[in-house]
Amino acid sequence: MALDPTQPYELHSQVALRPEPFGALAYHYGNRRLTFLKSVEMVDLVSQLDRHPSINAAIESIGIPVERRDAYLRSLVALEASEVIHAR
Amino acid sequence: MLVDQLKTGLDAPICLTWELTYACNLACVHCLSSSGRRDPNELSTAEAKAVIDELQAMQVFYINIGGGEPMVRPDFFELLEYAIAHQVGVKFSTNGTKLDAGKAVRLAAMDYLDVQISLDGATAEINDKVRGVGSYAASIAAMENLAAANFGPFKISVVITRENVTQLDAFQAIADTYGAELRLTRLRPSGRGADTWHELHPTNDQQRMLYNWLLDHPQTLTGDSFFHLSAFGEALPGLNLCGAGRVVCLIDPVGDVYACPFVLHDEFKAGSVRDSGGFTHIWRGSDLFTSLREPQSPGACGSCGSYDACQGGCMAAKFFTGLPLDGPDPECVFGNADEALALVGTGSAPSPGPGHSKPVSVKLSSRPTSLALHR
Amino acid sequence: MGTNKNTTAITTGPSEHADEIVDDMLIEEISIDGMCGVY
């Protein structure tokens, strides 16, 4: 599956985010999958995806350093695979 | 490391077990909650809904409803629907005796609901020895009813014993027949399990065989109950950590909160949901849970190179076999507890007490009593 | 669904920084049934 960071994405409507000291728990009520989001920036990013015209714009808006962006994108690929996020 | 953060506990459980009733129409030999007779002090429907409200506020995503037999509670469906309507996903565990065709259809229409059918033998011969005559047939009938109602994938949950550990492939075949998920779990010396643990728990050779089978079948659910076997080598899937009081706990039918379902004993009771502050205060501030979230000392296991893999095993297994909690698990794969276990005097291990057992239970050593399963 | 033809698409696959991938994963998936203490 190909994640396209130039496209708009959003958190799946069946996913609940529960803040934690390390970031957040994301639970998908539909497929019962539980994902740990391990940084506060990752939590901010997935929460705000729906407010931006693209993943790249969201990453830019949150201010993720350029050298860290690959890591965030790789994690977003995994989140799309488990249906936590999807293209909107 | 994520696991390290979880050991110190979270502000809310990730998942928990809620035993709705001590009433049960079966009398399994190894029942970890010593169930049978309803407790007159059970939480009322209103009290149960108040607990659900707290779970919703804490964002507990998923609970396992059990018992006893939860389907015997008259408000069973009412509470199920209330939980689901309040963002609490539900799995419930049942012996299947009450899961008739009509109930299966009703369950199939509900969303965010998982069903787990108990089965402790791939044949009636093995199953009924621990669960009673007719119990195998009841479990299979429930599975048939769920299939006929197009419920979708359900779970089959097995407690592994010396007698059924040779039936792993047969269990898988039953699960495959129904498109169900197979779940294998560990026998603990808890509840009535204390009486027969020594005869029923798997031998170390059988543990090794089970461990290899689990590695070969990584899609098998285990509830992480075999993390003590990770000392054999490659870690099994799962967190490999005791979640009790840290990420999970148990609420019992009268509202008492325990660290987990395997330690229904005052030593591991954190409080009652009926106390002021309710479940939330117990989870966040009880002395017991606070102490479980402190770093645990490896104790006698400190000199063993495998401690990181097995964490010293299960506190319930140690507690109810009379072993010290800061030492090896009674089923330590290296046999490190064998000597100490042999020295535990008869009757000196902490007793779970009679609990809510009915006077007559299935007795392992005699022919199983025929139980009136249809009331 | 993203289009595979888009040249900006990111796919899972080998990277020259394989070790960093493991260290950098900002998410971790755990089975909801993967915590001991639930029967």
Image (tube, coloured by chain):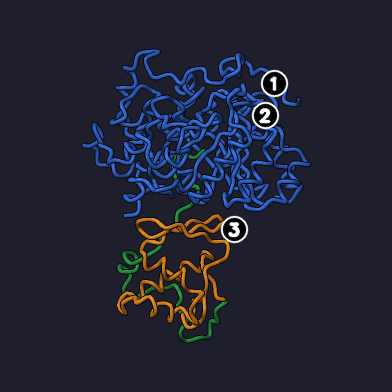
Label 3 and label 2: CA atoms lie apart by: 32 Å
Q: Which of the 4 quarters of the picture holds residue B130? A: top right
Question: Is B354 positioned to the left or the right of B211 in the image?
Answer: right
Q: Which residue is mark 3?
A: A30
For the point 52% across and 32% down, which residue is it?
B255
Q: Label 1 neighbourhood size at 10 Å, few (<14), some (14-19), many (20+)? A: some
User: x and y percent of residue B353 in the render?
Assistant: 48, 18
Q: Mark 2 near mark 1, Cβ–Cβ under 8 Å?
A: yes
How many marks the image carries: the answer is 3
Q: Which mark is residue B371?
A: 1
Q: Are marks 3 and 1 on the same chain?
A: no
Q: Amino acid at mark 2?
A: Ser
Tell me what residue is drawn at x 69 percent, y 50 percent.
B110
Contact flag, marks 3 and 1 (Cβ < 8 Å): no
Chain of the residue that carries numbered disc 1 in the rendered image: B
Figure chain in green: C
- Which of the numbered marks, if any, corresponds to residue B135? 2
Q: Is residue B326 above or below residue B106?
A: above
Q: Camera-side residue: A14 or B205?
A: A14
Q: Mark 1 is on which residue type? A: Leu
The secondary structure type at the circle numbered 1 is loop
